[in-house]
Each structure stands twice: as structure tokens, then as C-alpha cells.
Image: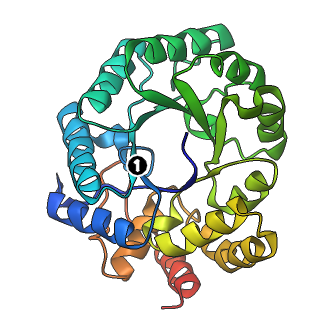
Amino acid sequence: MPAGAFTALVTPFHHGQVDYDRLTEQVQFQIKGGIDGLVPVGTTGESPTLSHEEHRKVIEHVVKIAKASGKVQVIAGAGSNATSEAVELTRHAARVGADAALSVNPYYNKPTQEGLYRHFMAIADAGDIDIVLYNIPGRTGIALTPQTVARLAEHPRIVAIKEATGSLDVASEIAALCGDKIDILSGDDSLTLPLMSIGGKGVVSVISNLYPDRVKALTSAALAGKWDKAREHHLALFPLCKAMFIETNPIPVKTAMAMMGRDTGELRLPMCEMSDANRAALKTALGL
């Protein structure tokens, strides 16, 4: 089961195309920084703007580099609001050697809890790969309830949940209902330590695109029960965590990476460049 620090990778673009050379550099930077795992083609990876061909190729590329290192896991973004499409993407992730597939709540069509249950069960039944649920109602318009998560946790392939409701009450109820049947990963950098204090196992992080070593240090301290040290890391990172969301993710993190010479900062519409005022605030937060 996943534990530790996982980076929600940005997808680098250059002149409108996926920049695979830069993607290689970014994965190698993460590995050097000691990250536990990589999550390509999620929200931070601008998955809604990638074609299916690009989606598959980015996952294959990241898996290839990660496996060559032998040091990091890959949780491949494979969600969709069409169950059949999510099944196909999950099967592809399994075929190319990903360790798990990240499956987001179906967006826009807003299914019932029974529909959500059947959707994720169909995905878990169809693919020979572990599934990480992704509960993010702010993006999808619908949330998995803790009771539905508990039902899904009975499936042997559903091993973890990326909890991004922003509610410690929801995370606490999931932990209480599921026990050790499912691992909880924070989907919000600013809540990593609070969530780990109630039994969470780590984070799928945005800020680790910039500082994989620092996010890893936080989760390692928490997993080791070194709460004073974990709190120290949390408080040091907290202003940067908030700065990463002064505009819609991944606009701030890509802008920050460009400021630090680690990405072009290019986004695909409907995402666009950051406002001048927020750029100045971000630069200050980065100490640049």
C-alpha cells in the first residue's frame, strides 16, 4: 500500500506540445530528491487538456524512467467520468507497469453514491492493478461519502484514497470506518500533517514539484512518530503551500517552476498565465 511523499507531476509543454525531455529531467529531479512516488496525469498534470494518446505516452514515459531507477512507485492518473473509458485507461496503466492507478470521482455527471460505488467496483474488477480513489468534490461536483469508501475498501484492489475534501472530519470518519483496509493520503499540502496525525499515510503533493526533499522529510518524520520534527517541517512549508493555490492549480506551481528555471511555465487553455499581482506575491513567498 502507498505511504510517504508522492509528487503530483506537472506536464511540461513547449510550443504547445508535451516536452518529454523536460519531463525526463523533472522525474530525475524527483528521484534525486528522495520522493517515494510519482503521480503523472492527474489534476496538476492538466489531464483534462491531454489527448488520450498524450495521456498514455506521458504515463509510459514516467514509468520507464521510474522503473529504471528502481526507487520510486508510479500511481498513474486513469480517471474519467465514463466508466468504460476509466477501465481502458486503468488497463493501460497496468500494461505499462504502473504500480497503481489514481481514479477520480466521475465529474460533471454527478452520480449517486450507488453509481459511484458501481463505477469504482467496475474499474477495480477490470484491471490487474491496485486502485487509489481520488475524492475531490471541489473539482468534480460530487464526493464519496465515508460510508461508500468503506464499502469500496472491501475490494482487495482498492488500497488507498487521496482525500482532497479539505475536511479532517471526513478523513477521520473514513479512518474510523475502514481501519487498515485502506490507506489515506492527503490531497492538500497544507493538511498533510493534520491528516497524518489521525492515521494518514502521506501526501500526493503539488509543492514537491519544487521541494521533493522537504515534503519527504515531513512525511518521514510523521511516519516515524517524530511529531515535533514533522511540525517543524509543516510550519516551514505552510506559507509556500498556501502560495501554491493563490490561483487555480497548476498555474502557481508551473509559474514557480519557471521562476526557478525548472519549467517553461507554459499552460494549455483554458488555464492561462498568472496575474501580475499574484506573480509578485508568489515570488515573495519563494524568496526570489
Q: Nearer the viewer, residue 274 or 231?
A: 231
Secondary element at image label 1: strand
Viewed as shown, does residue 231 lie left or right of 240? right
Number of numbered discs present?
1
Q: Position of residue 52 (x, y in %)?
A: 23, 31
In the image, residue 175 above or below residue 7 = above
Q: Residue at x 38, y 21 (%)?
A: 86
User: Which residue is label 1 attached to?
Assistant: 73
Q: Amino acid at mark 1?
A: Gln
Query: Is residue 15 something that shows in the picture?
Result: no
Q: Position of residue 142 (x, y in %)?
A: 64, 26
The N terminus sits in image quarter: top right
Q: Residue at x 43, y 66 (%)?
A: 209
Q: Which image quadrant is residue 220 in? A: bottom right
In the image, residue 166 above or below residue 65 = above
Viewed as shown, does residue 249 lie left or right of 163? left
Query: Is residue 18 something that shows in the picture?
Result: yes
Q: Nearer the viewer, residue 157 or 241?
A: 157
Q: Which image quadrant is residue 259 in? A: bottom left
Q: Position of residue 159 (x, y in %)?
A: 57, 31
In the image, residue 14 above or below residue 175 = below
Q: Position of residue 164 (x, y in %)?
A: 64, 43
In the image, residue 180 above or below residue 268 = above
Query: Dot 1: within a 10 Å radius of its alpha carbon, few (fewer than 14), some, or many (20 or more) residues?
Result: some
Viewed as shown, does residue 179 lie left or right of 244? right
